[in-house]
Image (tube, grey):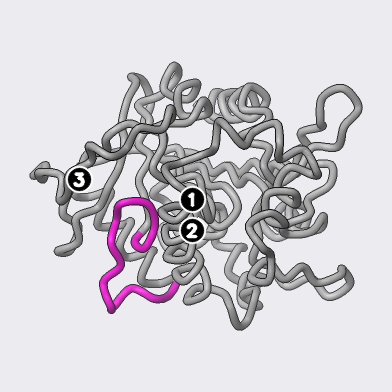
Amino acid sequence: MTTLTPPRDFSDRTWSSWTEPSFIEVDGLPTAYRRAGTGPTLVYLHGGGGTRSWTPLYEQLAAHYDLVAPEHPGYGDTGRPDHVDSWPDLVLHYEAFFRALDLGEIHLVGTSLGAWLAANLAIYYPERFASLTLVTPLGTRILDEPFIDVFRFTPEQEAEAMFNGRADRYAEALAQGDELDTIVHAFGENAMAALLFFNPRYDYKLDMRLQRVAAPTLVLGVDDDRVVGNQQAARYSELIPGATLRTIHGPDGEPSGHGVTVEQPDDVVAAITAHTAATN
């Protein structure tokens, strides 16, 4: 394993959740990741945001696991080479990433877009993972639910949808850099998301392919998902053999939302640790 020198100066990173990532070369791409903790190896695949930070969720997971939290090509501080523009490209990237870090048995967790990616990894490498946890996943074809066009959200609308109208409670904790830097960074990550699923917004082949998943699987849904809709989690649990579906309910009578990993990291970590313990 060859650890790379950071490809840029990070002295301007002053926000509270910032920690400097490590870098490893994966098929020629310097790939950013953060790693901490001891115990069984758990790889966490982030969603469409939440990069360039060490979150409370990561901190809690690192108390139980050897946590590896990479940033996908085109996200965070991992660049996007021209040849990476599809789910198969990301699957191959991560298979090489696991080999580059010499990771053995892996508990795989993904959130939102990262859950879709984690499912693909478990499809193509069904014997690779000790367990699979999908948090508020998307990607299956749902015909009888109103369409939510995430690519038309303004930043304000996205935040309100993520937290079911409670975005103001987390604005300070999620702030990163000045406004212009945040806008430019988000644009780059949204461009990568568009390459993956702008058209179509689902993968109709998941209906067949998810049957290949062999890892014990937990699917975590929420009370009211205003980003991917309320049927995705249940659909994944129906399609993956033996999968368990659990809903994380919101506190104080408020409906939990797509941003559950930010709002309720304690509940998410408790569900993950119970699931992985049951697979041992």
Query: What's under tag 3, amino acid-wise?
Result: Phe
Residue 222 higher or lower than 91, as above or below: above
Point out the tag, 3 or 1, that comes first from the N-terminus.
3
Residue 30 versus residue 237: which sits nearer the camera? 30
* Mark 2 vs mark 3: in front: 2
Q: Residue at x 63, y 81 (%)?
A: 200
Q: CA distance from mark 3 to mark 1?
A: 26 Å
Mark 1 secondary-structure assignment: helix
Q: Mark 1 = which residue?
A: 179
Residue sticking out furthest to the top: 63
Q: Which quadrant would residue 264 be assigned to in this image? A: top right
Please say whether residue 33 is visible from this viewpoint. Answer: yes
Q: Which mark is residue 22?
A: none
Q: Residue at x 54, y 37 (%)?
A: 174
Q: Mark 3 = which residue?
A: 23
Q: Residue at x 55, y 62 (%)?
A: 212
Q: Mark 2 = which residue?
A: 183
Query: What's under tag 2, amino acid-wise?
Result: Ile
Residue 35 higher or lower than 213, as above or below: above
- How many marks can you see? 3
Query: What's under tag 1, amino acid-wise?
Result: Glu
Q: CA distance from mark 2 to mark 1?
A: 6 Å
Q: Residue at x 53, y 28 (%)?
A: 57
Residue neighbourhood size for the residue with mark 1, other residues' Cα within 10 Å, grouped as few (<14), some (14–19), many (≥20): few
Residue 75 higher or lower than 198, as above or below: above
Q: Is residue 82 magenta?
A: yes
Mark 2 vs 1: CB contact within 8 A: yes
* Mark 2 vs mark 1: in front: 1
